[in-house]
Image (tube, rainbow, N blue to C red):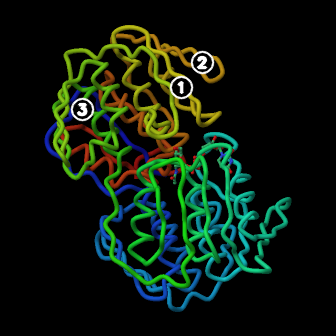
Amino acid sequence: MEKFIIHGGARVGGVLNVHGAKNSALPILAATMLADTPAVIHNCPDLTDIDYAIKILEHLGCAVKREGSDVTIDPRDFNCCEIPEELMRCMRSSIVFLGGILAKANKATLSAPGGCKIGLRPIDLHLAALKKLGMECNDCGEVLECICPNGLHGTRINLSFPSVGATENIMLAAVTACGDTVIENAAREPEICDLADFLNSMGAKVYGAGDKRIVIEGVKALHGAEHTVIPDRIAASTYMAAAAITGGELTLKNVFPMHLTSVISAFEEMGCKLSVKTEELCIKAPERLRRLKAIHTMPYPGFPTDSQALFMAMASVADGTSMFVENIFENRYRHVEQLRRMGADIKVDGKMALVNGVPKLFGAAVDAEDLRGGAALIIVGLSAEGITEIGEIEHIDRGYEAIEKTLSILGAKIKRREFNESGAVR
Ligand code: UD1
């Protein structure tokens, strides 16, 4: 069992290259199986979720070669349309393989997806949309048996919520469907645009990604292509938070500031000074962070739910009371209990949380219960007095490349330690 041990109080600063976006790389890897020749994906982050995606591709018959952040996928021996339960349970994004497998084989067998425990995270929108495209399935048991008796056919899909995963699944299923597909109320996240760019470089005809309406003209076949994954905007905001809470000054390179507009405004509201260039961003922390009036998480371009826990960590030690309203996931305050163990004063009432900033938090033994909530515990641990010990860090490894090494290079005192069953260091 591994834990992070943090000695709080060291400033985080310097220069950092942000790794590629996990949430872009996952659907892009799923898209590679649609081609009839190999694809090369650059800037693919080294994360456990990416390892699972590669295992799924290999299970489906694709040959995958990884050299640093370059991943080559040869889909020519695709020969399987079933994802075993152990791979499905590893991460929620495994569901994004459904659209691609159907496009490739007209049938798929999958069990329920896993992932962070941040709410129910149903897949009803995915299934309803794929059914409109021609899929039939028994969606009541543990295993989803899907089949497209007449292939996939273009249609009009009106999403009741702009689900990121459902939009991606529809895109993957529709690019080689017969006829045109229109997605109304599509998700507008930068990762959707990145997927559309990759699909178009493979020969697809996807128009309007980034807008509420996406139009997809089905094509007969797709070929492999080379693509560079966009920078990870959530990892970027995590390292910015590390600098902001410790009084540091940090320059991020390989970052797209236009993807961080709402987050940049929130850092400024807390008193940070930001300077922005095309692919570079510099943040300088104030003496003490100021409170945030109100953060409402919203679909992009609104404030990202994935950054909510990070800002709550900062608000815990800011001057004044901050309000948070979580509108995307119904169980995304799991970090609150852990922050309280470190001395945070947070009251939760349904979707709303009131954070009364205190001058200092104190190191404690806490657990990362989900990916971003776990990252928030690191952020607090960096500024807390004393030693913070974070368990269940496998959740954090899903979304950050060796976060302890990156933060150490930037001046933090954080180490990964292996513990045995009785709690002794190995
Ligand atoms: C993606 C991101 C995740 C981010 C989220 C919202 C990836 C791998 N993950 O997750 O980091 O927090 O977008 O920006 O890209 N919903 C349904 N039915 C469905 C699908 C979704 O009710 O069929 C609900 C979910 O339970 C949730 C909300 O819609 O409450 C948003 O989900 P969605 O946008 O689909 O998020 P993900 O694609 O799972």
302 left or right of 239? right
> Could you tell me how far apart the alpha carbons at marks 2 and 1 are, in whole angstroms?
8 Å
**Residue visible at 55% across and 71% down in the picture:** 217
Identify the residue at the far top of this view. 320
Q: Residues within 10 Å of mark 1 (few under 14, many from 20)?
A: many
Q: Mark 2 and 1 residues: CB-CB less than 8 Å, in contact?
A: yes
Q: Amino acid at mark 1?
A: Val
Q: Amino acid at mark 2?
A: Val
The residue singled out by tag 3 in the image is: 243
Q: Residues within 10 Å of mark 2 (few under 14, many from 20)?
A: some
In the rendered structure, find residue 88 and report the number of the disc placed on it.
none
Q: Is residue 359 above or below residue 126?
A: above
The residue singled out by tag 2 in the image is: 348
- Please tell me in which quadrant of the rendered image residue 315 appears: top left
158 left or right of 171? right
Q: Amino acid at mark 3?
A: Ala
Pair 2/1: label in front: 2
> Could you tell me how far apart the alpha carbons at marks 2 and 3 are, in whole angstroms?
27 Å
146 left or right of 211? right
